[in-house]
Image (tube, coloured by chain):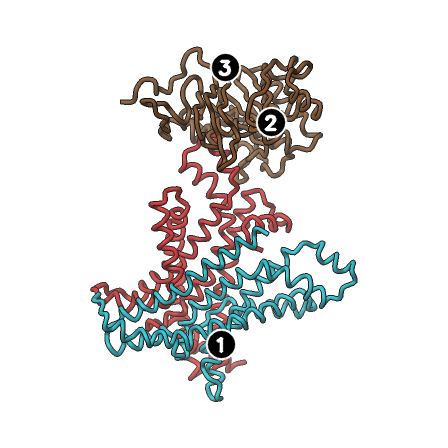
Chain colours: A red, B brown, C cyan
Amino acid sequence: MDAFLDDLSTAAPRFWDGLVVTLQLGLGGAAVAFVIAVALGLLTLSPNSWLRAPGRMVVEFFRGTSLVVQLFFFFFVLPQIGLELDPIPVGIAALGLNYGAYGAEVVRGSLAAVPKAQWEATTALSMGSVQRMARIIWPQAWALMLPGLNNLLVMLVKGTALASFIFLHDVTFVADDLRRTMGKLFSFGIGFAIYYALNQLLSSGMRILELRAQRRLGLKPESRKATKRAEAVAGVG
Amino acid sequence: MPPTDESLQPVPGAPALTFENVVKKFGDLTVLNDLNFEVERGQRVTLIGPSGSGKTTILRLVMTLESLTGGYIHVDGVPLTHVERGGKRVARRHKDVAQLTRRIGMVFQQFNLFPNMTVIENIIEAPVHVLGKSKEEARTRGKELLEQVGLGDKADQHPSRLSGGQQQRVAIARALAMDPEILLLDEVTSALDPELVGDVLQVLRDLAENTDITMLIVTHEMQFAQDVSDRVLMFDSGHIIEDAQPDVMFSNPTHERTKEFLRAVL
Amino acid sequence: MNWSWDHAAAVLPELLSAFLRVTLLVTIVSSIGAAVLGLVWAIVLREAPKVVAAIIFRILDIIRMTPIPLQLAAIWAFVITTDVEALTVGLIVYAVHYSTYMAESYRAGIESIRPGQWEAATALSMSKGRTWRAVIIPQALRATVPSLGNWAIAMFKDTPFLIMISVPEMVTAAEKYGGSTFSYDEPFILAGLIFLAASYPTAVLMRKLENRLATY
């Protein structure tokens, strides 16, 4: 036990440094992804095909071409045309664009899943399109999109493990590096524990947001039936 | 400059609603074919007829929830979605249509309350954000309307906590909060359990008695239709086959299809 | 950026060869493995004693929430002294990782089956095993196939993580070519296009399948 604690105090600073890199990529990527998801989600739902078509193309392009390829493209090709970026912003951009494109589908799907009757009620009350979206449709879609966004957030955090491909020392890199000096079971064990704890933490945060959103829609979170109904509406579960 | 005949001002003496050669198709299916009728200001007109005869479509066209395939609908003598310009049928600007539909309110079969808002928030949402009323003013009026529909104590409840009948009365209050000149009632009791229908109909009876709102009603409640209507229109396959005062329509219809229909529902 | 058709022509065969020999192989083999394993997890989580099910659930949760590169590196570190190939490690890690997602898809599919189906099977005195095989799985599969397909596509786009244990898949080949010639744009653009060309039609197919199954 003492030996373990000794190892732990030796390894802790290294893992801490790795965690900082992982968090920068994860939280930065998530923020960029969210903005892109909302923008592209609204764009791909537009009735105007001049807006919708380019939106769809961007979404399909970033969904279809693999995160690692996009990362390498930003990292190796952009400097050749004079765009020299640090690895962290490159990672954030790649994660943000890739998961933003996936998120756009969640946003679009959730907005489209709000019952047509709700859109009609806003027309019957003469609401403008901004008011309709901001005050009626979005709050309802928000509850529907959170489970999907939660899934994507977990994937995005796992996606940050590509950091070592662009020479960043994130948690995965540190775990792989320390196995030589500290032992495989120990270093990888800590690595797994960090990612698992981080994702559990983020997921429960998202779950709290989801419960709050459901409560605002009058779906009692304590009743299983209500949660079921919300899931049925969201097309999950 | 838009020509003067495209003004949005009500034409004095014009009917509240005018259907002029209205055509509505869903794909290949013609639901309404060359429909013409008028609803005078303050009149209560009930549409009856077998389901699928196009009654609900008429309300949805007036509310601009469906688009016209052909013809015109006039509100207070003003063309609603399309105008005739140089002999051609041209779509109106969205802004003008929105301006006109403010005079129209609608209550739906499925209530369509906003689940992300309390009862009172549902009611004041449009008055505050569409009409630009102050929150206090809208709240005061909203509370009055809730009293009027017998739900004065439910203002801060969540819609999902209310029974269907209570939800529908909230929906009526929400529509009234916009002070509509024309109220469209689309089978407002059809989704309710039988024991909850009475309260909703009573609210509407009071409304008919105490206001001069023009009403266009689709309902299967024949007694209610007889009580509140000035006029009943019998529809079949997208045509008005009989147009009469309620006592005549229900006691002494002339058309064979009307007799058949009334025998089946009464 | 100065696109050169010479570089493109030189790198394309290398990319395609890596694509066929590794990327596609891993995707197909590991997808099948994940689909089978996922079904096993879904049934076990429903039928096993509560404690066992809870433990398995937790293990699957850990696998699902930790990154593939870390999993690759960890398994590789343990087998590096044996004669297990890196490719085999890759096949297993991808199959197990995605089986945790596919188990969720199966669970949703199984739960979408109306209780009347279980009741009818009970009323007919069908055995548990028979009920699963003849009644539940065929119906659940119908609702689950598009979702499984989508996870397979996701796996496909995750295959470049194999760089972590130096399996020569397509993006590794692209990087190697870029490193030796200093022209990175052709290999990465081509690699991206190959991913897009393979995944987009499959995604469209899955969407179609989903819509068709939904209408029944």
**How packed is label 3: few (under 14 Cα within 10 Å), some, or many (20 or more)?**
some
Q: Is residue A103 left or right of residue B192?
A: left
Residue B51 against residue B179 in the figure, above or below: below
Is B15 in front, or is C157? B15
Q: Which residue is mark 3?
A: B41
Q: Which residue is mark 1?
A: C91
How many numbered dots are placed on residues in this image? 3
Mark 3, secondary structure of its residue: loop
> Disc 2 or 3, which lies upstream in sequence?
3
**How packed is label 1: few (under 14 Cα within 10 Å), some, or many (20 or more)?**
many
- Nearer to us of marks 2 and 3 is 3
Q: Position of residue A23 (x, y in %)?
A: 40, 64
Three-letter amino acid code at the position of disc 2 = Gly
Three-letter amino acid code at the position of disc 3 = Arg
Q: Which residue is mark 2?
A: B152
Look at the image and tell me in which quarter the N terminus of chain A lies. Answer: bottom right
Q: Residue at x 50, y 14 (%)?
A: B41
Mark 2, secondary structure of its residue: helix
**Same subunit: marks 3 and 1:** no
Q: Position of residue C194 (x, y in %)?
A: 36, 67
